[in-house]
Amino acid sequence: MLKKTQQFRIFESQQLKKMNQEIRNLEPKALWNKFADLNAVPRPSKKEERVIAFMMDFGKQLGLETSKDAVGNVIIKKPATAGLENRKTIVMQSHLDMVHQKNNDTTFDFDTQGIEMYVDGDWVRAKGTTLGADNGLGVATIMAILESKDIPHPAIEALFTIDEETGMTGAMGLKGGLLNGEILLNLDTEEDDEIDIGCAGGVDVTATRSYKEEETPENSLAFIITVKGLKGGHSGMDIHKGLGNANKIMNRLLFDGFQNFGLQIAEINGGSLRNAIPRESVAKVIISAIYEGAFQLDMQNIIDNIKTEFKTTEPNLTIEITETELPEKVMDLGIQEGLIRAIYAAHNGVYRMSADMEDLVETSNNIAKVTVKEGNITVQCLTRSSVETSKFDLANALRSAFELMGCEVTFGGSYPGWTPNVNSPILDVLVNIYEKQNGTKPNVVACHAGLECGILGTNYPNMDMISFGPTIHGAHSPDERASISSAQKYWKFVLEILENIPEKK
């Protein structure tokens, strides 16, 4: 007789197989089947070896010219179908890696497991993790077209870049001369009624320093403070929505506890990825036992105020304070005060709106990760802007806040934005097709995310670039979901674009 755990695993495996088949039966099948194939391959940023091998095998099995460049980008070339040989060569581009985020109560190993998907009404979701529709649906689109035998298209150079989510090192490492295409279709935006012609650049701002640990004073009580239940989301596309940042919320609690009760910090672990708005933060702190009642009362008052502030945007926000075992050591009070004040002073959220494009965030910052443990402090931020000077203006403001408390501050991973070209010939093609198919004009926009177009344009300055994609909500969070009806609309759009690429001059 099978044990209950074995029976459960067999049942779970059967359910996953059923859910996977449900995804494969969605229309357009060519797109969703390739997405299911891709999502079976673990593909975290900076660990793309398996998905690179998967994509190389895919191209070679199709008998297409397939290569990998020095940094790991995969290029697959397919000749034009009959009758379209005189059209301009196009580059179809998406990135292979995905953001790995999961709920705290979800058991999942991103390094070994494929994404577990299911259908929820008009949405495809994942079980407690990110879905990988960003940018997996773009990759799957290109794969389906490369594999097709009946989709008309011009000559295609498929470019699958690596490490877009944690530094864009694939795009930055792509050398000039590898591609001959005159038009680039980037399939990495997330609203199906938008056509992107520009994006923000970014820079990582990282503050670090060491500190002395002190013995925990006698007659102390220890508490775990937990901030959770926030929506999180994309630190560019969602930064204007007034969502809660777990690191900033935690800092309010720590600041008040320190000011009023001499709270001392033993550890902080807040946030996870630089490009995701932090959903959770956990801190271990101590106070003198004589303040226990007053501390609990004061904290509850602050918690109630914070929840009231965020009741509309963050209805599931939870802040818990529970007693725990005393730590052996805590932070030096002088360094602690500097850290708390620096995080309070450091800007988070929208810094400046664009003066040139309506409703476009120009410059912003995400205080993405705060770690305090065993004598070391690390604060990681991602600063974005479509204007280089404004990007570094905010980065220098952050640098100043953290240098004042003795941190070493470094700028890393800087990448340029993509300057909008309203006179783009391929833009005219897409706008006309969209209007014909949908009876309304698309929204021509620039986005506050880091698309690879700006970087690719440094080595391919004459390439006409455009970006579009199906509707995806909640990217970079476990609430990520892809619209099924939008994927159908998008697929139809892609097919007609391929048939209407302009002729070579």
Image (tube, helix red, strand yellow):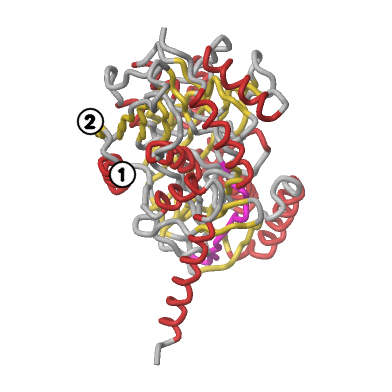
Q: Amino acid at mark 1?
A: Phe
- The percent position of residue 357, horizontal first and vertical second, equals 65, 17
* Residue in view at x 24 percent, y 33 percent: 67
Give the side of residue 415 with respect to residue 431, left or right.
left
Q: Residues within 10 Å of mark 2 (few under 14, many from 20)?
A: few
Q: Is 298 contained in the magenta span?
A: no
Nearest to the observer: residue 334 or residue 17:
17
Relative to 306, residue 188 above or below: above
Give the side of residue 238 with respect to residue 44, left or right.
right
Residue with the most extreme top position:
505
Q: Disc 1 designates what residue? A: 58
The answer to whether residue 200 shows anywhere in this view is yes
Residue with the most extreme bottom position:
1
**Label 2 element class:** loop
- The percent position of residue 173, horizontal first and vertical second, equals 30, 26
**Which quadrant would residue 505 be assigned to in this image?**
top left
**Label 1 element class:** helix
Q: Amino acid at mark 2?
A: Ala
* Residue in view at x 51 percent, y 22 percent: 466
Q: Disc 2 designates what residue? A: 70
* Residue in view at x 41 percent, y 63 percent: 328
Nearest to the observer: residue 284 or residue 59:
59
- The percent position of residue 324, horizontal first and vertical second, equals 52, 68
Nearest to the observer: residue 481 or residue 164:
481
Q: Quadrant of the N terminus?
A: bottom left
Relative to 421, residue 445 above or below: below
The answer to whether residue 285 shows anywhere in this view is no
Residues shaded magenta: 218-233
Q: CA distance from mark 1 to mark 2?
A: 19 Å
* Residue in view at x 52 percent, y 44 percent: 476
